[in-house]
Amino acid sequence: MSGFTGFVLRRVIGAVVTLFVLSVVIYVVFYVTPGDVAQITCGPRCSPAQVHQVAQQLRLDDPLYVRYWHFLQGIFAGQDFSTGTSVEHCPAPCLGQSYQSGRQVTDILLTKLPVSFSLVLGAMVIWLLLGVGTGVLSAWRRGRLSERVLTAVTLAGVATPVFVIGLVLMIVVCGELQLLPFPQYVDFTDDPEQWAWNLLLPWLSLALIEAANFARLTRASMLETLAEDHIRTFRAYGVGERAVIARHALRGATASVIALNAVTFGSAIGGAVLTETLFGLPGIGQELVHAVKVVDLPVVVGMVLVTGFFVILANAVADVLYAVADRRVVLA
């Protein structure tokens, strides 16, 4: 147990260090950018004096390392912001204040995260069921017509952009067949049934692309496992093909599926921009695109940092789950 505890501790420390390095890189990259942020924030009709006042209010005249230090202080201890007539306190974890709206970045994230989580969690269930199921069936039926058909469908899914799938689904399902309404995000607490119905098409659009990747990975991992000596031994002892597939070959593909699912889930939290934009979902991806357009740097940095946090967290959790499934990882 001590070995497993040490393994988990090493993963936690590694995740914290990676997140710190990521925060430094993100802050430097986005704040060392061309263009006058104070002028953009103030507007084209502002006088030089007004632009200077905005720069002072936003602390843009401070050295970069000083601003980063205030940023770290805000995360761990909170931060105070001057609005010109009063001082507003931003409690920890504080990721800054929007240049455009004056809202705290944390508050913006809290309103956008449920939408992105709703999209990704539902899509994850679908892409795992479709992807792993298709991969298992394709490996089981290797060399037959059904396997060729599944492989062709998988390749088509990988090559098709998500907005094409989304548009086709909306035209066919909502327009021609009128089976579903055009998606409008409904909060889960308001109406769980409408929440699910309105997210069904976005779930399918995002999941079909990712399911193709999971199908390819599962098929490749299972074919590799099926070629190993212990599988031939099981078959020689008369173990049924279904038992070999379900109990042994599928277990060999579990590690790869866990790792891919962690990366996919973490990156999709802030990376499903096309899906959110296509279906009008007010999630993190859509907010990030808007913040980049208006050069709202605190929102951009906060959004990218939170997205990176979920990617790092998902990978750390995947490592721990893999270690639970196979204790040899702990000793490696």
Image: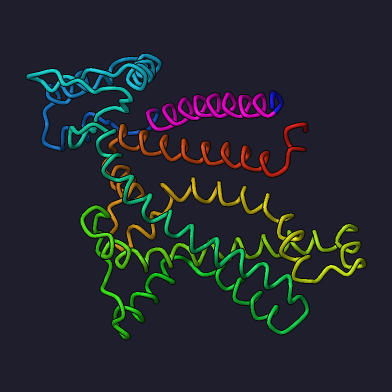
Identify the magenta region: 4-31
Q: Is residue 78 magenta?
A: no
Closer to the camera in the image, 141 or 242: 242
Look at the image and tell me in which quarter the N terminus lies: top right
Up-down relation of residue 226 to residue 312 (above or below):
below
Closer to the camera in the image, 59 or 264: 264
| Residue extending farthest left | 85
Instruction: Tell me the quarter of the picture where residue 105 sits.
Output: top left
Instruction: Tell me the quarter of the picture where residue 123 sits.
Output: bottom left
> Residue 67, percent across and down?
34, 18
Up-down relation of residue 50 to residue 184 (above or below):
above
> Residue 231, percent across and down?
85, 61
> Residue 236, percent across and down?
92, 67
Q: Residue at 33% of width from left, 45% of height from top?
A: 113
Using residue 150 as the reference point, say whether residue 228 is left or right of it. Answer: right
Instruction: Tell me the quarter of the picture where residue 85 sits.
Output: top left
Using residue 46 as the reference point, say whether residue 242 is left or right of it. Answer: right
Q: Residue at 35% of width from left, 16% of height from top?
A: 73
Look at the image and tell me in which quarter the C terminus lies: top right
Q: Is residue 20 magenta?
A: yes
Q: Magenta segment, principal secondary structure?
A: helix
> Residue 75, percent across and down?
35, 22
